Image (cartoon, rainbow, N blue to C red):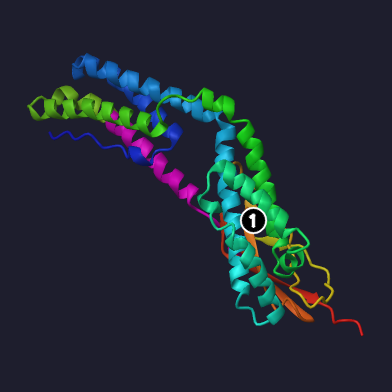
Amino acid sequence: MSIVLIKPNLSRYSVSGHLEYHKVTYLLCNKYASVIQAPDLLAAYQKKVAREESVYAWVRSSEYTKRKAEADRERGDLYSAIVGLVHVNLKNLDLAIRNDARHVDNLMTSYSDLPHAGYDSRTAGIESLVARLRSDDYFAASTALGLVPWMDGLEMRNNLFKSYAENTAQEQMDKPDFTARTARGESDRALRQITSRVTALINLGEPDAYTAFAGEFNTLANHYNTLTHEHYGRLHARIDLSTVPSRIASVDPQAFTGKHVCIIPEISLVLTDRNGGGTKTVELVFTEDFTVSYKNNIGPGTATLVIRGIGNYSGKLTTTFNINKKNA
């Protein structure tokens, strides 16, 4: 009878799933220590799993470090969105809008190194950029280009980043001197040494002695591989805005100004609750869950607002609002 040990898909296990798998598998290997006949390998495996567990404990407690990284990513996205809006309007058919875009673009050029700057320099640079966009020299142009909501979002994320950064000092002092990736790799290598030994012994012609161990080992591997597949399916299943019930709050008629009229809509979705059936209402957050763009939003008439999902959401929704005629 041929016995083959199933290879667990360790590289795709979540942080907690990877550690849990190794803890359970170590107990299994220790149970069959007399069959494996490699106390040195088992001791090394136990040591590596304990090290991975200490890293995981730090990762779980390092909330501010994770939030800081997320806030940094989000402020980078918002900065890129502002640059994109300015560049798009450099080709606007409206001469006044093109001139506004050129004016702001000259300012943005002086901040082009922001995405590559260090944390502290980026924080100070964003504060300076937002302050200048709000100054008398640039605020009218920023408003005409529809940048104000994005500027507000950028300032908010920058302030969040500063707040989280102030709380990471103690976390960094407690940080282990090895990374989670290193700890994972060491646990994986320690297990491979054990499975390689068992496979070699099976090939030497003593498969019957390892039937029970192989059966339990393969059951564990299959179980965790299945969990990982399901986890990835959930993780990457973005919700398409166009496929779920949604509500966009109605927008009151807007006054004609001769400039772009920019509205940030209120959007809610009705989603199925995976935890117990039924439904729940989720309010979407601008710049986190969706972005907006506009069509025909200068002159009197019907303007179109296009909502595109980002982050955990994909797809798009559209709604309209009216721009009133200019009073005589």
Q: Residue at x 27, y 30 (%)?
A: 189
> In screen coordinates, is 294 left or right of 236?
right
Tally the marks: 1
SS class, disc 1: loop
Q: Main secondary structure of the magenta part?
A: helix
Tell me if residue 150 can be seen: yes
Among the 4 quarters of the image, the one containing residue 49 = top left
Q: Position of residue 327 (x, y in %)?
A: 91, 82
How far across and down, in percent of the image, does residue 133 sit? 71, 59
Residue 78, placed above or below residue 157: below
**Residue placed most toward the observer, 183 or 173:** 173
Say which of 325 and 173 sits in front.
173
Q: Viewer-proximal residue, 171 or 38?
A: 171
Q: Residue at x 61, y 35 (%)?
A: 165
Outermost residue to the left: 205
Expressed as whole percent of the image width and height from the top left, the position of residue 144 reads 74, 70
Q: Residue at x 82, y 72 (%)?
A: 254
* Residue 222 vertical placement versus 37 (above, below): below
Q: Residue 219: say if magenta.
A: yes
Q: As shown in the figure, which amino acid type bears the numbered disc 1?
A: Thr
Residue at image location 58% in from the left, 30% down from the top: 168
Which residue occupies the foreground of this view, 252 or 128? 128
- The N terminus lies in quadrant: top left
For the question of whether residue 273 can be seen, the reply is no
Q: Is residue 310 left or right of residue 36?
A: right
Locate residue 103: give its quadrant.
bottom right
Q: Residues within 10 Å of mark 1 (few under 14, many from 20)?
A: many
Give the quadrant of the C terminus.
bottom right
Residue that extends furthest to the bottom in the rendered view of this protein? 328
- The image position of residue 9, as x and y in percent, is 32, 40
In the image, the segment drawn in magenta is: 217-244
- The residue under label 1 is 287
